[in-house]
Image (cartoon, grey):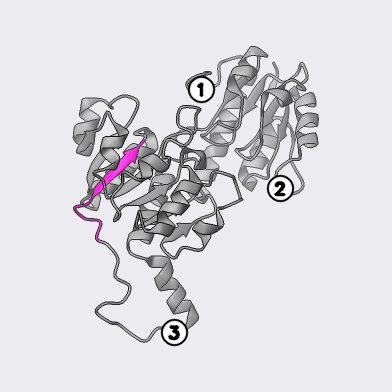
Amino acid sequence: MGSERLSVVVTRRLPEAVETRLAELFDVELPTEDRPMSRDELIAAVGRADVLVPTITDDIDAALLARAGTRLKLIAQYGAGVDNIDVATARQRGILVSNTPGSTTEDTADMTVALILAVKRRIPEGLAVMQSGTWQGWAPNAHLGGRISGKRLGILGMGRIGQAVARRAQAFGMQVHYHNRTPVRPQIEQALGATYHDSLDHMLSRIDVLSVNCPHTPATFHLLNARRIALMKPSAVVVNTSRGEVIDENALARAVEAGAIAGAGLDVFEHGVEVNPKLRAQPNVVLLPHMGSATHEGRLEMGEKVIINIKTFADGHRPPDQVVPGNS
């Protein structure tokens, strides 16, 4: 398949350098506005493209894939997560799916630590005081937060990002604990000073901070539910930079409101942009607009991976970041 004839439809505005390179290599359609495509626009796109470049904001489900034309052969996701794509149905229809793993690892891990510090050290509350102009000066009992050195960090999902969070936690003097489907290799565990918990319940009852770093799958939906949140210490906090659906957001909001846990830092939400009003109202909850991977460097790396995946496919080879159904 000649790359000069490959029709590529991009669903969102990407960094200018990425768009320019795509235009050099392929017959590319770029959106004029920076907004998610409507359902009708997505249907039209999959009907005319050889390659679709969607993002996490596009719902590529079985019904949409049924409307795909015979030309569509690759969905090159701009992003590491692919829970917005029905990968199994795509495969059944002869459509490959690729993603951009690794490009968001370090940035998301940085943001995880930033959220831990923001919640534990009450940084947003301090900002609010300074911005309001009401600060009266230093006082011994003002804005007291919690130390993180020596505390137990529980990592839910010890993949690339979970391990990057563990490395940072070590530097802050935290004790690293983790729950995963299977333990990581002994040499990784040793390097991270990490303790494996086969039982998530067991880990939750012993940690001071929980970092959610696992993908959203049917098995992880509401993994942190009301029963499990109730196992945590009243002094514990929850941080999520992965996927909102892993946490029962209503249960979390109730727990924070009741003082059953000490706070939360969230960069992702169960219902997209619809954030639970109870969470918005709590001073010990830090909310960010899905900024975990939002760095110039990370966005460019994601674009480079998309281009490599499409170019490799155009040259007749398997995209290096092809997603296998069941392993996404």
Give whichever of discs 1 and 3 has the lower sequence position: 3
Give whichever of discs 3 and 2 has the lower sequence position: 2
Element class at badge 3: loop
Q: Give the residue displayed 64% in from the left and 20% down from the top.
A: 314
Name the mark nearer the viewer: 3 or 2.
Answer: 3
Q: Are marks 2 and 1 in contact (CB under 8 Å)?
A: no
Q: Can residue 315 be seen in the rendering of this structure?
A: no
Residue furthest bottom in the image: 136
Displayed quadrant of residue 50:
top right
Displayed quadrant of residue 63:
top right
Q: Alpha carbon of mark 3 to alpha carbon of mark 2: how far?
A: 39 Å
> Is residue 151 located in the magenta-colored stretch of the structure?
yes
Q: Give the residue displayed 80% in from the left and 35% down from the top.
A: 40
Say which mark, if any, is on residue 308.
none
Say which mark, if any, is on residue 35.
2
- Left or right position of 38 against 140: right
Residue 141 lies, in percent from the top left, at: 26, 77
Q: Residues within 10 Å of mark 1 (few under 14, many from 20)?
A: some
Q: Label 3, on which residue?
A: 134
Q: Label 1, on which residue?
A: 320
Q: Alpha carbon of mark 2 to alpha carbon of mark 1: how far?
A: 29 Å
Identify the magenta region: 147-156
Name the mark nearer the viewer: 1 or 3.
Answer: 3
| Residue 258 versus residue 61 in the image, above or below | below
| Residue 125 versus residue 159 in the image, above or below | below
Number of numbered discs visible in the structure rendering: 3
The amino acid type found where label 1 is placed reads Pro
Q: Give the residue displayed 70% in from the left and 38% down from the top.
A: 11
